[in-house]
Amino acid sequence: MEYEKYHFIINPTSGGGSAGKIWGQTRNYVESQLGKFSFEFTASKGHGIELAKRASEKGIERLVAIGGDGSISEIITGVMQSGNRDIGISILNLGTGGDFCRTLGVSGDLKIALKQLTSGKTIHADIGILNYTDNDGNNSIRNFINIAGCGMAGEVVKSINQSKKRFGSFSYYISSVKQLLSYKNKAVKIFLDNAPPISHRIVTIAIANGKYFGGGMQIAPEAKNDDGIFHITVIEDWNLFKKIFLSANLYNGKILKTSGVFSYTAKKVRIEADEDMAALIDCDGEDIGSLPMEARVVPSAVKFIV
């Protein structure tokens, strides 16, 4: 295909299928503001990696992602595989943008978002590289841009992704309520850089490059995507009462001041199950496998223009 200055990669199933519909309604307006552009739709999980890699190898100036955190993560992976570190990446939030959009400050207003796309600030963002055990029991590796975690969050993401009906943040909320009642806290060991292991019995752990997950929960309020380190939040062995009444602090930014919550920083993190109990992993909103997992940060790996 012929690539233009701006090349859009669109996940039409994002936002419960709304992304494709909204794109059809806004495409002409986008063209009136940007001029001629090229675009492609992803057809399946992982397809965004292939499309982004191919476009990046052609030396285009800008890739524009339309989709949630998983879609953005695929595009980042494709760019990294191409070896093109000069390409700029932007996000057009058509109401389907995920939690990483919140950290970057990408507007949900189309006019403002297009201004950010054409004249926004440049952020040289870190990414994470994750080694883990996938759902087939194989050792695997992938990039992540927002958050990789394990525990109850992994169970919630798996439940949502298995559901035929998805309603954005509301789906996460409903699935979280169900897991609050049934989830059994897991014993894990956490290895931070070269320090001795730390043992916790956890509700969830987030290895954060961004501040938010789960449709607006501030799991790592101090995280920055350009500081060269991960911010790790550990929610320890909350009982059902605490799970219900302290979860509000995930939304008001006070989670790190909450009883039973621990915060660490590191450039490399390894998490192992301390018992014969599977702890599921979620990575940028995808359920990908189970412990053990190891993440390392790659500073200033990609260039966002937002």
Image: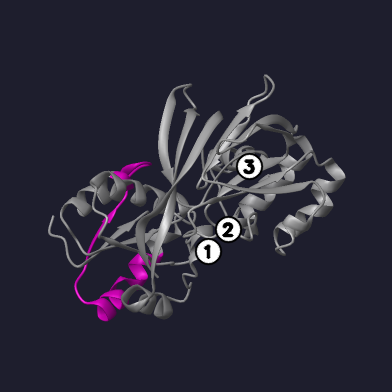
Residue 283 in the image: above or below residue 257: above
In this rendering, the label closer to the viewer, 3 or 2 = 2
In the picture, measured across the screen, residue 181 lies left or right of residue 66, that is right
Please name the amino acid that badge 1 sits on.
Thr
Please name the amino acid that badge 2 sits on.
Ala
Kindly check if marks 2 and 1 are in contact, taking CB atoms under 8 A apart as contact.
Answer: yes
- Tell me the quarter of the picture where residue 277 sits: top right
43 part of magenta stretch: yes
The residue to which callout 2 is attached is 223
Report helix, strand or loop for mark 3.
helix
The magenta segment is 22-49
Q: Earlier in the sequence, mark 2 or mark 1?
A: 1
The residue to which callout 1 is attached is 103
How many marks the image carries: the answer is 3
Indicate the position of residue 174 as horizontal and vertical percent values.
68, 49
Which residue lies most toward the top here? Answer: 276
Please name the amino acid that badge 3 sits on.
Val
Indicate the position of residue 130 as horizontal and vertical percent values.
46, 38
Q: Earlier in the sequence, mark 3 or mark 2?
A: 3
Badge 2 density bin: few <14, some 14–19, many ≥20, Cα 10 Å: many
Report helix, strand or loop for mark 2.
loop
Using the image as rendered, state which of residue 72 and residue 228 is in the foreground: 228
Q: CA distance from mark 3 to mark 1?
A: 21 Å
